[in-house]
Image (cartoon, rainbow, N blue to C red):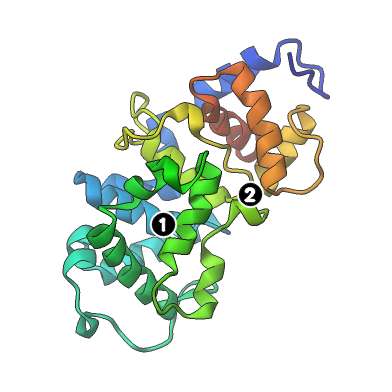
Amino acid sequence: MVKSKINIPNLKDFLDEKSAKYESPSFIKDDPIIIPHQFSNIKDIEISGFLTSVISWGNRKSIIKSAKKIIEYMENSPYDFIKNHTDSDLKTINESIHRTFNLIDLNYFIKSLKNIYNEYEGIEEILSNKNNGSNLQERISTFKNIFFSLNCPKRSLKHLPSPIKGSSAKRFNMYLRWMVRSNNNGVDFGIWNKISSSELSIPLDVHTGRIARSLGLLERKVNDSKSVTEIDNKLRKMDPIDPVKYDYALFGLGVYENF
């Protein structure tokens, strides 16, 4: 049993309660996950979710506003645009989309996604293929290598993580939570069935890291891939089937309860 640094008699019961409280449809309206929730087609959901997750750093309202710009750029039909766009459909001006993610980056991401769907049958196929790594974190790194295998601008490389090089891969792990976890509570989508929720890792950032340390779930001082493994090991003892449900508890405690 994990012992909390704060006086919480039963940490698992406490986190189970908080997870159930915050994993509800009311969570959606203020979160970037609202973008893929605009769609019903599975491919539209996974593409809009992927691109939204890529820019998910900073203020959540700003993220949502920027993600809407991306969807509009793709004519509100993400999968159709990815599959059928031509170079003439892509603007050549260099303008910002979201902070350091600009139109050069977005255009490359669109072209690479077209290649992913044409050559690999989609994002899920790469991430579920055990030949690409023994666990999801290794497969995220392989996905990055495949994704940037075209003639990519060097500036774009920073927008996808490589856990085997130490990244916590917060945004990618969040995206995987969206795609894989059950939609029983109306928040995540559960549209991928080749990856188990038991394989997922916590989307670790400065906020969840702070809460995790205060609860005794994390000793390591930096938010990197080793810290993700440390928290994962403890959360999987609490719930080996669905450990990342606790992301809602850690997030909610930090954002809504100023824990």
Marking on residue 96: none
Q: Residue 247: horizontal and vertical position, in percent?
A: 56, 33
Tell me which corner region of the image, top left, top right, bottom left or bottom right, holds residue 209.
Answer: top right
Please say whether residue 244 is visible from this viewpoint: yes
The C terminus is located in which quarter? top right
Within 10 Å of disc 2 (Cα), the crowding (few <14, some 14-19, many 20+) is many
Q: Residue furthest front?
A: 131
Please say whether residue 35 is visible from this viewpoint: no
> Circle 1 is placed at which residue position?
52
Q: Which label sits in the foreground, 1 or 2?
A: 2
* Of the image marks 1 and 2, the number of the one nearer the N terminus: 1
> Circle 2 is placed at which residue position?
168
| Residue found at x 53% / y 30% | 244
Within 10 Å of disc 1 (Cα), the crowding (few <14, some 14-19, many 20+) is many
Tag 1 secondary structure: helix
The N terminus is located in which quarter? top right
Q: Residue 106: horizontal and vertical position, in percent?
A: 39, 72
Give the camera-side residue of 64 and 162: 162
Q: On the picture, is 126 further left or further right than 58?
A: left
Tell me which corner region of the image, top left, top right, bottom left or bottom right, holds residue 114.
Answer: bottom left
Q: Is residue 71 above or below residue 257?
A: below
| Residue found at x 29% / y 36% | 191
Distance between mark 1 and mark 2 Cα atoms: 18 Å
Give the camera-side residue of 140 and 74: 140
Q: Residue 11: horizontal and vertical position, in percent?
A: 70, 16
| Residue found at x 23% / y 45% | 42
The three-letter amino acid code for the residue at tag 1 is Thr
The three-letter amino acid code for the residue at tag 2 is Ser
